[in-house]
Image (cartoon, rainbow, N blue to C red):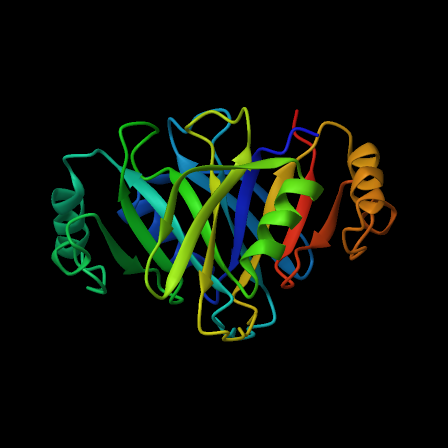
Amino acid sequence: MDGTFDHVMIRVEDLEESLDWYQTHLNYEEKGRWEADTFTNIFLGPEDVHEDGALLELTYNHDGRSYELGDAWGHIAVRVPEDALQESYDQLMSEGVDDYRDPESCGNRYAFVKDPDGHEIEIVKRDHGAKWSIDHTMVRVEDADEALGYWTRKFEYTEYPGRWEADTFSNYFVAPEDAPEEAMKLELTYNYDGREYTMGDAWGHVAVRVDDLDDAWDALMTRKAPDYRDPASCDHNYAFTKDQDGHEVELVTRD
């Protein structure tokens, strides 16, 4: 299977507010839209996003529901040039974005802001990829060995350089072995204190590209991935499995 991350989906309560926020502050543009009777999906990214770069999917349900963030999902991280962290953060502050964690409080290595629904967005320094393009998505896992085994065996991923083992937690980054550096990675955060996490419903899923949907699904079933929503139940347009902690993983084909 291809395995490149295609997008990450979040749910929003006010579509126009969220669209304005991402288009104004991160200079995102609309890359695609799906209007259904009960919901709207919009795909966003920088104008010059890499062909293997991940997009952000905003899902808006028309029934006016509210969402809970939970803590099983952490954040998406967006890129800025190596020498532009403070400048980029100051720009967001001047535009009225909420001050959450400034560069100084993060050792001038990164910073954090939040979108209108409270999804955390990390700003990271990178010398590759379009400004504000998605660098990684972070999820929290309850067993690091099990999580690494899931992505290594089920999706044939490899662990990338960047492992960070601290006194109380570890971070691991996984992606396809041959993914370009502009592609999104998945950050697995493991806290040593044995805590459990609440999934919430404000975060939706990460989506993985596959060459052939049925072949990829069959391979995942052989590898004992959870059978959540098979291709037939999704009109053979996509499919869903889950990781060991219940984070949803969508399979999509891309022309």
| Percent position of residue 166, x then y | 33, 58
Identify which residue is drawn at 72% across, 27% down.
211
- Give the left or right position of residue 236, taking residue 9 as reference: right
197 versus 97 height, above or below: below
Identify which residue is drawn at 85% across, 39% down.
218
| The residue positioned farthest toward the front in the image shown | 167
| The residue positioned farthest toward the right in the image shown | 232
36 versus 185 height, above or below: below
How many marks can you see?
Answer: 0
Who is closer to the viewer here, 119 or 117?
Answer: 119
| Percent position of residue 45, x then y | 42, 38
Can I make out residue 34 in this image? no
When asked about the image quadrant of residue 210, the answer is top right
Quarter containing the C terminus: top right
When asked about the image quadrant of residue 155, the answer is top right
Who is closer to the viewer here, 241 or 38?
Answer: 241
- Give the left or right position of residue 179, taking residue 132 as reference: right
Can I make out residue 142 in this image? yes
When asked about the image quadrant of residue 138, the answer is bottom left
Quarter containing the N terminus: top right
Who is closer to the viewer here, 199 or 233?
Answer: 199
| Percent position of residue 165, x then y | 37, 53
- Give the left or right position of residue 166, taking residue 149 as reference: left
Identify which residue is drawn at 17% across, 58% down.
102
